[in-house]
Image: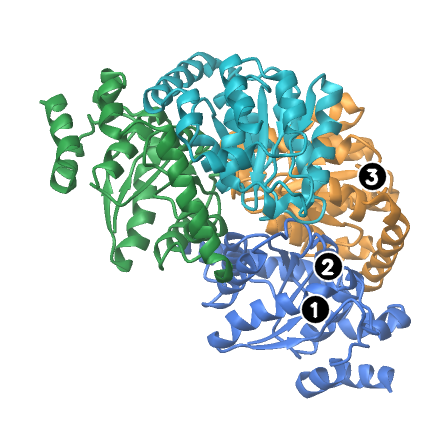
Chain colours: A orange, B blue, C cyan, D green
Amino acid sequence: MKIALINENSQAAKNGIIFDALKTVAEPLGHSVYNYGMYGAEDKASLTYVMNGLLAGILLNSKAVDFVVTGCGTGMGAMLASNSVPGVFCGLIVDPTDAFLFGQINDGNAVSLPYAKGFGWAAELNLQDIFRKLFEGERGLGYPKERAEIMAKNRGILRELKAASCKDFLTVLKTVDQDLLKAAVAGEKFQEYFFANAQDEDIKAYIKGLVN
Amino acid sequence: MKIALINENSQAAKNGIIFDALKTVAEPLGHSVYNYGMYGAEDKASLTYVMNGLLAGILLNSKAVDFVVTGCGTGMGAMLASNSVPGVFCGLIVDPTDAFLFGQINDGNAVSLPYAKGFGWAAELNLQDIFRKLFEGERGLGYPKERAEIMAKNRGILRELKAASCKDFLTVLKTVDQDLLKAAVAGEKFQEYFFANAQDEDIKAYIKGLVN
Amino acid sequence: MKIALINENSQAAKNGIIFDALKTVAEPLGHSVYNYGMYGAEDKASLTYVMNGLLAGILLNSKAVDFVVTGCGTGMGAMLASNSVPGVFCGLIVDPTDAFLFGQINDGNAVSLPYAKGFGWAAELNLQDIFRKLFEGERGLGYPKERAEIMAKNRGILRELKAASCKDFLTVLKTVDQDLLKAAVAGEKFQEYFFANAQDEDIKAYIKGLVN
Amino acid sequence: MKIALINENSQAAKNGIIFDALKTVAEPLGHSVYNYGMYGAEDKASLTYVMNGLLAGILLNSKAVDFVVTGCGTGMGAMLASNSVPGVFCGLIVDPTDAFLFGQINDGNAVSLPYAKGFGWAAELNLQDIFRKLFEGERGLGYPKERAEIMAKNRGILRELKAASCKDFLTVLKTVDQDLLKAAVAGEKFQEYFFANAQDEDIKAYIKGLVN
């Protein structure tokens, strides 16, 4: 699985800690991790939590990645922004049991974590445990497993509800504030990672037009 | 403020406890609480967490209420469903500090809580503390207060992103699975509470057409 | 390592869940688990949280076990009672990171967990994660490891402080309320497990005198 | 009620934040707060978590204060040390519900809090909520109130168990490592606060002999 890490400005200084925890856990499990920044508080390209959500949408809808790990101070803003975008189903995850249950029951494609609230000493241990629960096994199996079928059915209905609510993603890209969009894709590594991995030609073309 | 409580089938048996905690806190603060059910595990009208989200959308977009308290076993499903709907900004709240920060920073119009995960003995105390933090003072003031302006600005940008992503709510009502929609508004008290309070005539008319 | 599980009356009905989680994790790691009860709410031999602490003291001071897992509704009472007894250093553990840090930094010989407060759906997953962090590796290595030496030194000073505070354990056994003591050792399996494993002949002899 | 705050070296830099939160809550409720330090990481008089426990014992057994708020990185070490001392019943408190239940059920005379683990952004809000639950009303009333009597009875039995385990406090003072003891009472304000408030003449005299 391809996993993107996206951090916003208020917690950008922790990008290194989070990326380390994510790589340490996910790579030995066979996943690839793409660090889309911000890489530090002083990055020229600054992301707000709203941009995190939009960027998550770009990466997931284009299939540049299969899963997004984002967050902000409380995790709430980045979660709200991610869930505002078509095709993104973003959990808010605080502890390992949250991560496991989200993986098995909701089987979304993004998580937002709090990197300031409750994030104290040894928080890197909790991060690793969370990432392990998310990425170590098959997701979507239900918990308890006897309820797998009804849980899968409800996920399908949720997906239909969201599809009924949302415009198609390319339309969203075109109608959203173009300055916001440009800022969301201005990260130092965005172009390198995105154009090498994205699979939706229309989204790629539209983004290419923007960044040139 | 008018506050709706919406519970789904898996935690329907706890509706009484949650409603009590909500009323105990919110009414002395001058708010009105509308219990939209489910009222118990055996209710004829059964809500799934997806329906909770759709119902939250109906109540908020029609201005039948100003705020929705929903949830499910982990709170995650009802949060995802609520955030899938235009005009709903739903936090996932586990503790009183979450509630306070969500109120001050994100100032959304809905919260989803876990009523099974972590919900053990004396959980009613935590519910009351959460509701107090949400409903006792003015929201949207920022935390810390020096950051109020930038926080308000980002909320505005989030609202624009969501508006760019979503169709208008009446369109959603018309295109969503009509059986899902009928089930979402089938609760015993729905018609009494909704038609007395909703202020959007188009939404009212469309729902009226459905339930007759 | 030999590990005892001790539950008190208010959460006795959960003994099976806790024992399962403990065995599932600890036995594959090479540990043995002794279930000292209570085994259910209707047990003839009833333990209060105070008796849990006294029983923990008997098992640890006699070396019948190397480690005690106890608890009560909030974990607080059983923790206080355990720490009231000579030779017992009992942590209060709520999440896996607590367990890891307690093991590495404090390296005590007992833990108390809350089996009612916060103990909701899927709590068995958190139990397993906690037990894994406690029992899977070497304890007392410090966290971060650079601080191992100072942490070990402080543990030694703590042990000396407690030794200065407390009478020797046999004296405590003889002076404590003998009815309380008899009740603490009245469990159905106590004699079978204790007399087969205890290594302190004086404590064994005193208990033998009591239960005959 | 007279309340002491005691911090150890690893979290000494947070003494100001904790003291502010404690005063902000406790003083309007009619309590007095004595800040026994450490006041900062550079204090000449350095306290380890073991010294925190010994100092808590001195303050409570001499009745210089009625209640002690202490802690360390995880809260665990200061809790263990406090509970190692005669006459101290110290809870480990992480959230407001812990604080309320500890106050109503266990009614101890000390609490230890984690000031590093889980202590992130806005942690001062959680501190205030915890202190409010501890200090705002009468303690020891039981929760639920119907269980007040049995809870009070068990507290009495716990006190008897601890009394059976421990030597009297003056003996402990005399037999504990005297360098540890001198370090525990070396804080800048100790003599001012202690000698003005302590009510046990034997303890006062012994400490006076030490610090002269």
x and y, in percent, of residue A113 in the image: 62, 42
Q: Label 3 amino acid?
A: Arg
Tell me the tag on residue A139. Answer: 3
Q: Amino acid at mark 1?
A: Ile
Is residue B30 visible from the viewing direction of this image?
yes
User: Residue B69 at x, y = what percent?
Assistant: 64, 66
Dot 1 corresponds to which residue? B6
Determine the CA span between mark 1 and mark 2. Answer: 10 Å
Q: Is residue A190 visible?
A: no
Foreground residue, C56 or B136? C56
Viewer-nearest residue: A29 or B23: B23
Q: Are marks 1 and 2 in contact (CB under 8 Å)?
A: yes
- Is residue B46 depicted above or below A40 in this figure? below
Q: Quadrant of residue B160?
A: bottom right
Compared across the picture, whether D193 is left or right of A195 comes to: left
Both labels 2 and 3 in a single chain:
no
- Badge 2 sits on which subunit? B
- Residue bearing mark 2: B78
- Residue at 82%, 82% in the rendered image: B206
Q: Is residue A140 above or below residue B23?
A: above
As drawn, is A16 to the left or to the right of A154? left
Q: Verify CB contact (< 8 Å) between mark 3 and mark 1.
A: no
Measured as percent of width and height from the top left, residue D10 is found at 37, 27
**Given the image, on which type of amino acid does mark 2 rest?**
Ala
